[in-house]
Image (cartoon, helix red, strand yellow):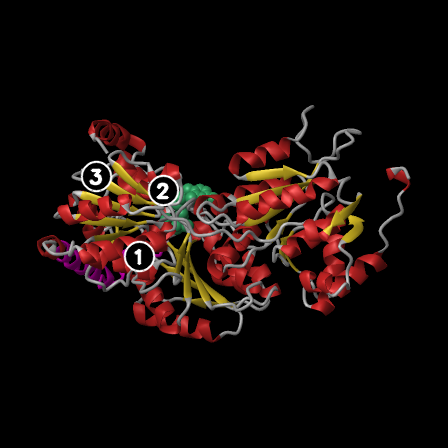
Amino acid sequence: MNMLERLQVAESHLRQRARAVAESGGLEAALAKGKIRKLVECTLSEALVLGLLKQGVSKYFAIFGHGSTELGNVLRVYEEEGVTRTLNCRNEVEMAHAATALRWQYGELSAVVTSIGPGALQAFAGSLAAASNGVGVYHIYGDETTYGEGYNMQQVPKEEQGLFGRITALLGQSYVLHTPEGLRDALRRGALCVNHPYRAGPFYLLLPLNTQPARVTVNLSALPEQPQLPKLAPAGDIELARAAELIGGAARVAIKAGGGTRGHDAAVRRLAEASGAAVVLSPGSTGVLPDAHPQNMHVGGSKGSISGNYAMGEAELLIVIGSRAVCQADCSGIGYKKARAVININGDFADALHYNNTLALSGDIGIICARLAERVAASRAADGKAAWLAACAGKKMEWQAFKQQRFDCPPLQDEVWQRPVLTQPAAIKVVADFARQIGAAKLFDAGDVQANGFQIVEDDRTGDTYTESGASYMGFAVSGLLAGGHAAVPRYSIAFTGDGSFMMNPQVLIDAVEHGVRGMIVIFDNRRMAAITGLQLAQYNADFRTNDGVAVDYLQLAAAVEGVRALHGGYNAAALRQALDEAHAHDGLSVVHVPVYAGPDERAGLGAWGQWNVGNWCEGVQAEWVRQDL
Ligand SMILES: Cc1ncc(C[n+]2csc(CCOP(=O)(O)OP(=O)(O)O)c2C)c(N)n1
Ligand SMILES: [Mg+2]
């Protein structure tokens, strides 16, 4: 029979399959019980939904368009039968962030669905956060038809093939479902990409308008499952013995715990204690070692801290764990001024070999840290490190005293607010303490809010803070709250955001209410994009176009959305605490608006303790970088 003459897939068949899956308690069970045959004739869209189901994906974030009506129809029926769930959203960047947060915070893999063109490109932009933080998410975009019957509205307007596939492949991996039978291959590649053990990221499925409804015979048994990969570590003991020797022979050892150490708390702690190493955290790894642990030097890097940057600068041996050496983390490559050698623990060869004079220990962080810790403990490598750790502890006390001064700073007279208002660090500290008190997760948006945030937080374990420091995407935190609408066990979460970042994705007000999110947005409003003002002033002594003169009543704006509880955060710590209590009592989304100070008073910031290769600092940083051997 000619393909063009094939019968339409009747909705009843679609529904029967969905029901069989639901009644059996999953696709595998339905197959095992024979409730669904392994060879199914269906549309490519349904085959895709079934294929994703096989990988455990039943949650979708969507903004449909003419580029995804067929897929939308399948998702409608599968949802009616209780198999999948789709959250409709108001902005594609927002929903890409929500899907990233769902995987990152809750470990749940989901798919983002857009139309063709603008919707796809917006979601694609948002997926930078997933790519930058190594978070696996499926993105499914409508794409131009494969017959080439004429320009499709919203395609890239060029006489060229497969452009969306190429654009998306630049950021992650992509597959254009030009041929419906290619689904098996597409999903095999996708499964590895989004579940990669140390370099996961977004996988883009491009779904042409005309192949979505095309019929395909799919073998459900042959569709790939979530890959199960063994943990890898060096096969022999030679490298580990050498590493232990290096640690034993160095008087000053620092561990740089990158984002990859998240979840390896116990292993990192054991290695640090056995090695007598000072531990420097990255913005994304606060909590890996408890804040009060004597060897925790807090964050280091371009912003950094007194103690973190001291340990970086003074260490003669550097142990890098799960870090890809972004400028924030390693001061644009010149953060380790006295380091002679590096031990680098990372699954990724390129990351492991980032520095010269490196002993690469490639593989799983947990296994390698444990094996190395055992060796260094046996050789008593921590002996003789007391002077080093004492010096570091002194710096940590200095940092703590410095921070306390900032937290104790009284409200400062502000030009815009025409009255004394809290400084941003003082206000963030109050909210961070409140989050700890109620056991809430903290999500941080970009800007000063983010930098002050990671300098302030005092976490005791992985998973209490999510700061999207990979891309620093304004709007990530507020959008990330939407993950709670999909999570199997949602956790009360607080998004710390600036006035600039909040307005990037205010749609979340509506979407969070629609999808039953319980959580809080705290807007630290300094009526400007202060992080950039700060950089401009530090570099060129003049600010330029980083604020405007339009007053915004955020309370009225938030309260305009039915279901949102909007509260003023007041002008001092006590008033803010009171507002947080009230906000938390609301069974839904609350917004707390806190006016904060912007201006020249130094007490309004937590300082920058490292170096950064930007603006008019480049010459100096690069001159140093060229001369250093690491
Ligand atoms: C989407 C996006 N656009 C631009 C930037 C560059 N950027 C980083 S921080 C920032 C300003 C943030 O302002 P706000 O959220 O008000 O926080 P503040 O620094 O004032 O505390 C800008 C423009 C970015 N990180 N993300
Ligand atoms: Mg601001």
Q: In the shown orientation, is residue 134 left or right of residue 36? A: left
| Residue under the point 49% across and 61% down | 106
Does the magenta-highlighted stretch encompass residue 393? yes
**Residue 179 quadrant:** top right
Q: How many marks?
A: 3
User: Which residue was labeled with disc 2?
Assistant: 324
Q: Is label 1 in contact with label 3 (beta carbons under 8 Å)? A: no
The nearer-to-camera label among 2 and 3 is 3
User: Which residue was labeled with disc 1?
Assistant: 370
The nearer-to-camera label among 1 and 3 is 1
**Tag 3: amino acid:** Ala
Mark seen at residue 341? 3
Q: Nearer the viewer, residue 563 or 482?
A: 482
| Residue under the point 44% across and 49% down | 500
Q: Position of residue 1 (x, y in %)?
A: 91, 39
User: Which residues make up the magenta segment?
Assistant: 392-420
Q: Nearer the viewer, residue 539 or 1?
A: 1
Tell me the distance, in whole angstroms, between the alpha carbons under discs 2 and 3.
17 Å
| Residue under the point 59% across and 50% down | 91
